[in-house]
Image (cartoon, rainbow, N blue to C red):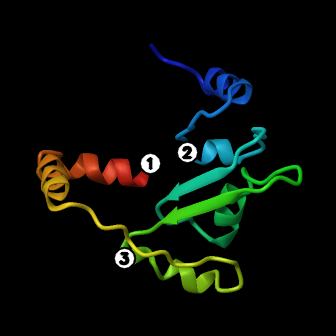
């Protein structure tokens, strides 16, 4: 079944405690109430896009947080946003068995699919 952005947006807007995984479409002129956390995966195009994405949280005087997940080769972005309150957190440890399972699963995914998923 194919759902439209409007259907998901409406459901998310009315619900409590949901997690919405989306592209930058939801960062454009969409106001969801009570968003307390925005997780950005991958490098924003620029600092303005980073700020715009983060602007989905902490609205109407409420508190909010943002997490930006960057690959090591994307960390240069932090230098472009020195004036923003961004702190680098330590990478959590992963138990060796879980790491092996993830690596094994990723080895079965074609490179083109990995590239497309990353660029999404």
First reached walking from the N terminus: tag 2 or tag 1: 2
Distance between the Cα atoms at labels 2 and 1?
7 Å
| Above or below: residue 2 compared with residue 17 | above
Could you tell whether 23 is left or right of 29 in the image? left
Query: For the residue labelled by badge 1, is the local secondary structure a helix, a strand or a loop?
Result: loop
**Residue 13 at x, y = what percent?**
72, 29
**Residue 16 at x, y = what percent?**
68, 30
Q: What residue is rendered at 64% in x and 20% in y?
A: 7
CB atoms at circles 2 and 1 under 8 Å apart? yes
**Residue 6 at x, y = what percent?**
67, 24
Q: Quadrant of residue 96?
A: bottom left
Could you tell whether 55 is left or right of 117 in the image? right
Query: For the residue labelled by badge 2, is the local secondary structure a helix, a strand or a loop?
Result: loop
CB atoms at circles 3 and 1 under 8 Å apart? no
Q: Quadrant of residue 66?
A: bottom right
Could you tell whether 53 is left or right of 114 in the image? right
How would you rate the neighbour count of disc 1 (Cα within 10 Å): few for under 14, some for 14-19, many for 20 or more? few
Q: What residue is rendered at 60% in x and 48% in y?
A: 24
- Depth check, front residue: 19 or 21: 19
Q: Which residue is mark 1?
A: 120
| Above or below: residue 11 compared with residue 98 | above
Q: Which mark is residue 23?
A: 2
Distance between the Cα atoms at labels 3 and 1?
19 Å
Q: Comparing marks 2 and 3, which lies closer to the viewer?
A: 3
| Above or below: residue 19 compared with residue 106 | above
Q: Which residue is mark 3?
A: 72
**Residue 36 at x, y = what percent?**
69, 49
């Amino acid at each position: 079944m194919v759902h439209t952005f409007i259907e998901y947006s409406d459901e998310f807007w009315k619900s409590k405690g949901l997690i919405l995984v989306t592209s930058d479409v939801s960062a454009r002129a969409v106001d969801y109430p009570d968003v307390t956390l925005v997780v950005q995966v991958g490098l924003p195009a620029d600092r303005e896009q980073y700020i715009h994405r983060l602007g989905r949280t902490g609205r109407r005087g409420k508190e909010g947080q943002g997490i930006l997940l960057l690959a090591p080769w994307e960390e240069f972005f932090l230098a472009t946003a020195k004036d923003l309150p961004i702190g680098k957190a330590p990478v959590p440890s992963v138990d060796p068995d879980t790491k092996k399972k993830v690596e094994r699963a990723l080895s079965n995914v074609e490179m083109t699919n990995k590239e497309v998923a990353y660029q999404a």
